[in-house]
Image: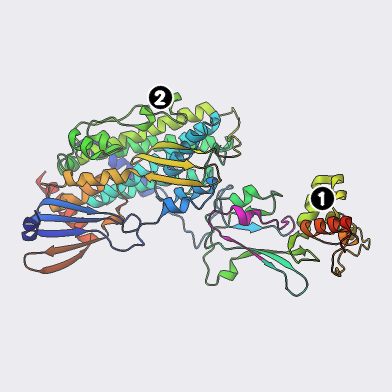
């Protein structure tokens, strides 16, 4: 009976003289560990706006808005809502550039207004000049062009984007006067419209 | 029977609030202070997890099943990954197997420490509560360092694990385990040698071997009654066949033995983690295999969660979503044992008997006493039940 009490007394005395086990968090800043999974944040420079994070998110915490009729051209906005986020890190793992969205170590994301903690990134969207269908973001196409290297010259949209970057006038942005013709193939058209342009020209239907 | 019940006092225990995790409802039929019958109802918070998982990709389901339980949040992904790998016939890289074991066993330690603390709290031993939760904190910090979160680890992936345990984190993990061993030694002896706890818990809520077999109870509840069922030994998976550990059993099946089993199991868990660390330290290697698609078929997976066997069944039709996902959590089979363990006990003992099974104990957040005979109704909150339990401990303390 006596021995066990002594053992516990030792622990009690050690506890009494050791520093408090809790931290003074709100008064002293807390540094999370290096690999802490905190709030995901977009890197505006590296994100290409492919929307992979939107597709893989298990909690649907990432919102993708494609606005075709926006002022200043069509845009794609990716918004991360921390309230729905599971902090699983799937967006980071599946990011095609590996740098576009990264989990930060920010843990203190309580808010009064969700806008203060939301994280978003905006990209210029390319839409088909003929049918208006979304092709992809401009940055995504250029990223893909750099990956496929010389093969990219076979792709008219990629080629025109690249020439635009080199400040060569291409006329790719010009509107297509319907019906679509083979000469319009170098303009920004979706794969479906390009096929129509090519085949209909072969058949000489127009 | 219904006629009998009307004459007795009925003590319903259980929340009706759907926001609480695992709400359950117990009605105790009492004759004076003695419990003569127990009724149990579940299903107050049906979250449709099985249906939801049919709408998620194979890879996304791991995050969904992780959120079935907040405390044993690695058990469900573990069992789910076992099920999908059973269907695939895929083999997991060796390093990933050991990492899975480390995460599973760390979780067992923190879950059992949480139980010890809560049991102390219900009995009026708040020092046990404070100390056990203090010792649990380094384990959670270790989780934060290794996986990036204290609770939902997001480590499991079909065919491996998502994150590696870095070599630089291993010394810290070993240090935590070494410190924990000393503290657990103290805590175990402090609990087991205490004459008051012995008098309070021995012979309370006894479950015999027949009870366990009839109710199909699993985990520490079954092992406390002398049935050594442990999935880690009976149906080895992950790295468990390569590891040396004992299955802890006890004989009497009362709440004291359940505490003994849980306390001693933590030492086995520490042993397992140390062996796993020895096996992977400095060796490197893959942590996941690439899995392209899931063929049609069905698979089952099991894992020995801190509370017992966790079972997952999945059926695939070759698409990227499961067509059927069946989950059976251990508490589901353990909770009906109250029908055997509570009968013949006093109301103050019921709190600890219910806690002995380790259900998520937000289940008894409200207590209402109905006197069916007099048509009177008295409402108590959960603290009243705990208060009664503590008063009994005080009484025993004075007697000894």
Residue topped by disc 1: A145
Tell me if I can see residue B193 in this picture.
no
Across and down, in percent, residue A127 comes to 77, 64
Q: Position of residue B148 (x, y in %)?
A: 53, 47
Task: Indicate the quadrant where residue A115 lies.
Answer: bottom right
Whether residue B56 is visible here, answered yes or no, is yes
- Crowding near the residue tagged with mark 1, few <14, some 14–19, many ≥20 C-alpha atoms within 10 Å: many
Disc 2 is attached to a residue of which chain? B
Q: Nearer the viewer, residue B45 or B380?
A: B45
Q: Which residues are magenta?
A: A45-65
Please name the residue shown 44% across and 30% down the image.
B237
Q: Which residue is the site of mark 2?
A: B244
Residue B138 percent across, percent down from the top left:
44, 44
Per the image, is A52 magenta?
A: yes
Residue shown at 56%/48% (left/top)?
Answer: A33
In the image, A97 versus B200, the foreground residue is A97
């Amino acid at each position: 009976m006596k021995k066990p009490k002594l053992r516990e007394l030792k622990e009690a005395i050690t506890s009494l003289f050791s520093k408090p086990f809790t931290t003074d968090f709100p008064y002293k800043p807390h540094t999370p560990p290096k690999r802490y999974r905190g709030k995901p944040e977009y890197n505006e420079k590296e994100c290409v706006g492919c929307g992979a994070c939107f597709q893989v998110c298990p909690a649907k915490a990432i919102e993708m808005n494609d606005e075709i009729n926006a002022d200043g051209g069509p845009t794609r906005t990716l918004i991360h809502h921390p309230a729905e986020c599971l902090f699983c890190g799937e967006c980071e793992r599946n990011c095609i550039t590996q740098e576009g969205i990264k989990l930060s170590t920010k843990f203190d994301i309580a808010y009064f207004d969700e806008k203060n903690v939301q994280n978003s990134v905006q990209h210029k969207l390319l839409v088909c000049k003929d049918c208006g269908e979304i092709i992809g973001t401009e940055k995504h196409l250029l990223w893909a062009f750099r990956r496929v290297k010389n093969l990219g010259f076979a792709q008219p949209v990629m080629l025109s984007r690249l020439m635009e970057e080199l400040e060569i006038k291409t006329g790719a942005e010009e509107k297509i006067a319907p019906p679509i013709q083979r000469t319009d193939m170098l303009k920004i058209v979706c794969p479906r419209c390009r096929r129509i342009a090519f085949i209909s020209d072969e058949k000489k239907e127009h | 029977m219904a006629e009998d019940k009307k004459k007795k006092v009925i003590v319903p225990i259980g929340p009706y609030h759907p926001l609480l995790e695992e709400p359950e409802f117990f009605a105790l039929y009492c004759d004076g202070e003695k419990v003569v019958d127990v009724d149990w109802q579940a299903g107050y918070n049906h979250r449709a997890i099985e249906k939801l998982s049919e709408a998620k990709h194979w890879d996304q389901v791991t995050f969904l099943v992780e959120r079935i339980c907040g405390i044993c949040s690695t058990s469900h992904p573990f069992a789910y990954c076992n099920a999908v790998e059973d269907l695939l016939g895929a083999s997991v890289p060796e390093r990933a197997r050991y990492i899975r074991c480390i995460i599973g066993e760390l979780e067992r330690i923190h879950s059992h420490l949480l139980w010890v603390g809560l049991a102390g709290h219900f009995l009026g031993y708040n020092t046990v509560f404070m100390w056990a939760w203090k010792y649990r904190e380094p384990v959670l910090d270790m989780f934060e360092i290794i996986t990036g979160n204290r609770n939902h680890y997001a480590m499991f992936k079909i065919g491996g694990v998502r994150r590696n345990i870095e070599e630089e984190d291993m010394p810290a993990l070993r240090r935590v385990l070494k410190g924990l061993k000393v503290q657990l030694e103290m805590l175990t002896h402090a609990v087991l040698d205490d004459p008051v706890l012995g008098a309070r818990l021995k012979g309370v809520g006894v479950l015999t071997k027949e009870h366990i077999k009839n109710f199909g109870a699993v985990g520490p509840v079954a092992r406390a009654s002398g049935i050594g069922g442990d999935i880690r030994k009976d149906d080895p998976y992950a790295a468990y066949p390569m590891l040396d550990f004992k299955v802890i059993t006890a004989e009497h099946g009362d709440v004291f033995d359940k505490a003994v089993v849980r306390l001693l199991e933590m030492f086995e868990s520490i042993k397992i983690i140390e062996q796993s660390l020895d096996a992977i330290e400095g060796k490197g290697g893959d942590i996941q295999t690439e899995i392209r698609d899931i063929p049609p078929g069905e698979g089952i997976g099991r894992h020995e969660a801190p509370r017992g066997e966790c079972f997952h069944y999945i059926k695939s039709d070759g698409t990227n979503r499961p067509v059927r996902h069946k989950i059976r959590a251990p508490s589901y089979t353990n909770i009906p044992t109250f029908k055997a363990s509570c009968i013949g006990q006093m109301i103050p003992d019921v709190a600890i008997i219910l806690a002995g099974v380790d259900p998520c104990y937000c289940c008894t957040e409200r207590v209402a006493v109905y006197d069916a005979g007099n048509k009177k109704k008295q409402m108590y909150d959960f603290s009243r039940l705990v208060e009664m339990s503590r008063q009994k401990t005080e009484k025993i303390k004075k007697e000894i």
